[in-house]
Image (tube, grey):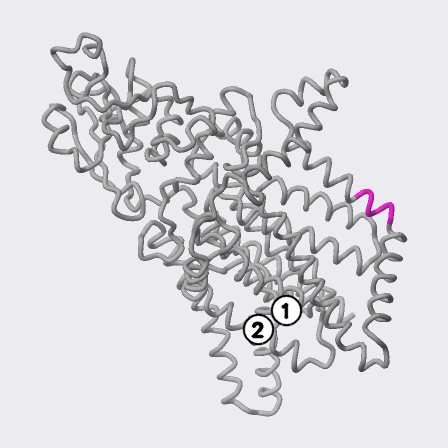
Amino acid sequence: MAAALGRRRTAAGVAVAVLLALALRFALLGDRIFHWDEARVGYWVLQYQASGEYHYRAFVHGPFLFHVNEFLFGAFGASDAVARAPVALVGALLPATAWLFRTRLDDVEVVALAALLAANPVLVYYSRFMRNDVLVAAFAVAALGFAVRALDTDRGGYLVAAGAFLGLAFTTKENALVYVGMFVGASALLLDARLFTARRREGTAASALHAELGRAAAGAFARRRAVAGGLAAFLVVFVAFYAPRPEIYAALGDPTRLPGVVAAGSVGAWSEFWGTWGVGGAASRDHSYVSFLFDAVRTLGAASLMLCALAVVGFLAERYAAEDPRDFVQFAAYWGIASVVVYPAATDISGVWSVTHAVVPLAVPAAVGVRVVVDRGRSAYADGDTVSVALAAVVLVAAAGQMGAVTAETSYLMPQDDENELVQFGQPASDMRPTLDRIERVAPRNDGTDVLYYGSHFQAPADTDTTDPASVADTNWFHRLPLPWYTERAGAETASTTRLREPATDAAAANATTVEGTEAPVVIARAEHYDEVAPLLDGYESRTYELTSYNTVFVVFVDENAPGYDAP
């Protein structure tokens, strides 16, 4: 009876954590201006929605957000909040995965794990961001949780669920493969520990290895149907997402075309992935490992200091103080430490979002650290030691307060500020929402070019197909981000020029687009060109913003006489 009551309380605690996570992630979700990375993916989702054509391109990562957001844009319209909603929802449900580990953690630890996953500043910030890191972390943890449940309950359905969620992880971002590597590596360290201690059990490392491998093989054979079901679920999810559109729909009506579609959604997708992110792939990793590692540690210290401190306490207590150290806690600690060390080498840019992949596993030993503090407080209370009770309470309040204060600052008070440790360089520092809203009102009422970019910084080759990610690679089109997301959403026709005036002696260039002769209601230029451009745009209002977190100042000129300029 008492055990059942405890479980109900634990379940209620996890549910409260999920509700908190939902509130933190969906409140003011559309306020922050899109980051460059959000904008490029959002722009191509709009292209997919318009054309119905999708083919996997590794450098914009997996198809999950493309397919989900293409549906959501059709149902609810394209907006910053709608685009971020899938990540916010999955990030909010991540704390629920703590319930899957209830046989490996005690009740306090399960609730603490859910709370840490709900309120950690890094996870909150990047759950409010249309990017795949929180998605791959959540799906991979869910897959691990269902696999653990399969081992603990001997129910094959859990392995099928594990396969499906692992498949979802692979549809979000290519570093799902790193997660599998982390799981294998952490398991190998656990095995090594057992082999090392085999001598104390009057055995040998060889006999212990033989016994462990035999148990694993026997377990896999006994669950062979469930294992096969899990593999099938993984492949179905993987191919369903990666298969090209609209070819997959045609194949459903013509089964003879199905093998080609399946091949494109499996072998073809793997070839595209390996050609970009594999060893020797197109993605550059020519950077200082030490510099990237320093950035990651600095971000962890600034945004997740208490979680990391509690993780150290929990790991040391489990490994050196517990009578029977639990494999799962050590597994998660090894996984978290390895993530801190590995990602600076694996990533192509020093994106602070990469620490997401360390914070999630470190939350497990951190939850153990919370339980250690709670146990000390309980023991002190039973002994009448009010000082120790107060100290335990101070530690818990400080941990909650640090998370709350940093979350409020990073996600709500200064989500675009360069001083925010979670802001990556591609985040515009200015709140340009009023001007963007004005562009979205003006563009649909204008005929011809709606937005004209001036200067070589924004100039893209005339034959550039901006609907194709491969076509704009290494072009100045990326310097316009995140503006293309907003202009495309408004249905604006865009053009670019490097000419201020029409040259009188060049007949061929006389008809070229120029700033002086433009009828576009919106002109965009770098701030350094303001003195050249402003005199040619009589009647245009100008506003200055930062297109990145710092030092990329640009000016937006909007015709005050354009229809829609003063519309509410």
Badge 1 marks a residue whose secondary structure is: helix
Identify the residue at the far front of this view: 280
Q: Can residue 274 be seen from the camera position used here?
A: yes
Name the residue beneath numbered marker 1.
109
Q: Which mark is residue 370?
A: 2
Instruction: Tell me whether the residue at label 2 lies in contact with that at label 1, contact meaning CB atoms closer than 8 angstroms.
Output: yes
Q: Residue at x 74, y 24 (%)?
A: 259
Q: Residue at x 74, y 65 (%)?
A: 103
Q: Can residue 64 be seen from the camera position used here?
A: no
- Cα distance between the residues tagged 2 and 1: 7 Å
* Quarter of the figure with the C terminus: top left
Closest to the observer: 223 or 104?
Answer: 223
Q: Residue at x 72, y 66 (%)?
A: 104
What amino acid does circle 1 point to?
Answer: Glu
Q: Which mark is residue 422?
A: none
Residue 191 location in percent, x, y? 75, 67
Q: Determine whether 447 is above or below 237 in the image.
A: above
Main secondary structure type of the part rendered in magenta = helix
Closest to the observer: 364 or 351?
Answer: 351
Q: Is residue 447 left or right of residue 338?
A: left
Q: Which residues are magenta?
A: 224-229
Q: Is residue 228 magenta?
A: yes
Q: Is residue 211 left or right of residue 530?
A: right
Badge 2 marks a residue whose secondary structure is: helix
* Quarter of the figure with the N terminus: bottom right
Q: Residue at x 47, y 57 (%)?
A: 122
Residue 239 location in percent, x, y? 68, 33
Residue 506 location in percent, x, y? 16, 11
